[in-house]
Image (cartoon, rainbow, N blue to C red):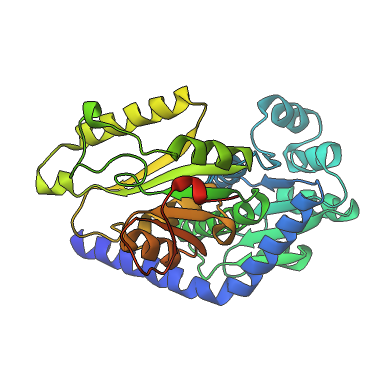
Amino acid sequence: MFEQINKDFETIANNFINLKSLSKEIEEVCNVCITALKNGRKIMFCGNGGSAADSQHLAAELVGRYKMNRPAINSIALTTDTSILTAVGNDFGYDLIFERQVEGLGQKGDVLIGLSTSGNSRNVLLAMKKAQDMGITTIAMTGAGGGKMKETADITINVPSETTNHIQEMHIAIGHIICGQIEKEIAPKIKALFLDRDGTINEDYGFTYETEKLDFIDGIFELCQNAQKNDYKIFIITNQSGVDRGYYTLEQMHNFNNFMKDEFKKQGIEITDIYCCPYLEHPDRKPLPGMFLKARDKYNIDMKNSIAVGDKERDIEAALNAGVTTTYLFSTKAKESKGKIINKLTDIKF
């Protein structure tokens, strides 16, 4: 059994490595979907069995979210409405369960993605034929052979396997890649004001974690209020190695942050998110850009038009390493910096 498990992993790993050969086709599918969505159209998915589950999974990633918070993306799986499926199946036959929905729901300029491990599922083939008659772009996701769908679809992604489970594994991986690219292009980009915490937002008393020692620095509320008026979302990016050093716990760190957020809220300021690195050595620890990049990827932040403020040079370096081009070092002592040196937080203009 152990040897078979290792062999299965090797097969899966090799399959995914070989998927690189389909990168151009996947990029083409991404572009087709993005164009359709930008034109106010939608993406439809259909398939049977495991491919039905994948259809629902991928539609959910778009209507809900894949990685980032953003408005819902217009997508539907044609595999979910049991009343339609059973009515059409009973009255017209199982072969027409997707075609009928394409006819009723589809519009010229939409995209239909059909999933079939064999590439020969008749109900998917008929749906794709109907879609093409209506001016809907058709995309086939199949196995190595491609089946009849390869001859029918406008674009075919036939993954390098003839084994059903491995085909499905690759289909969902490709689907995730497509969802990720769609999300990045369709979701509106936001501008961010990135703030260090201790020494920028509040007085730094050395590993500050007690709420009774939360003393806000002059100008921080005015800075944040001006940022909000200019459509910036506010993020706090802070090293908190005091946890790793044993000075305070994660719970105490979170309690302090939540208390601070509530104090901001009393001033009409919404803190979108707080990123903390509680470790002495970690890719998130500034001057490394990890926390900035996590915020960027989750919220689709336009880093070039965002602003970062910190009281130490490592704050500036981390922001620059993440692609933030406008940075301010808040200091009365610094003589030089990679960012613009300011003595008052209110010196920052939006």
- Whether residue 259 is situated above or below residue 218 in the rendered picture: above
Q: Which residue is nearer to you in this view: 260 or 333?
A: 333
Which percent across, then down, holds residue 305? 59, 58
Q: Is residue 273 left or right of residue 186?
A: left
Q: Is residue 14 left or right of residue 101?
A: left
Is residue 119 in view from this perspective? no
- Whether residue 339 is situated above or below residue 298 in the rendered picture: below
- Residue drawn at (65%, 56%) of the image: 185
Which percent across, then down, holds residue 263? 39, 26
Q: Which residue is nearer to you in this view: 127 or 290?
A: 290
Q: Quadrant of residue 26?
A: bottom right
Please identify the quadrant where the N terminus is shown. bottom left
Q: Is residue 183 left or right of residue 290?
A: right
Which percent across, then down, holds residue 85? 70, 31
Q: Quadrant of residue 16?
A: bottom left
Is residue 311 in view from this perspective? yes
Which percent across, then down, holds residue 20? 52, 74
Q: Which residue is nearer to you in this view: 59 or 213?
A: 213
- Residue drawn at (41%, 69%) of the image: 338
Q: Is residue 325 left or right of residue 279?
A: right
- Whether residue 281 is situated above or below residue 228 in the rendered picture: below
- Residue drawn at (77%, 52%) of the image: 38
- Whether residue 104 is situated above or below residue 1 in the rendered picture: above
Find the residue positioned furthest to the bottom.
Answer: 21
How many callouts does the rendering have? 0
- Residue drawn at (20%, 52%) of the image: 279
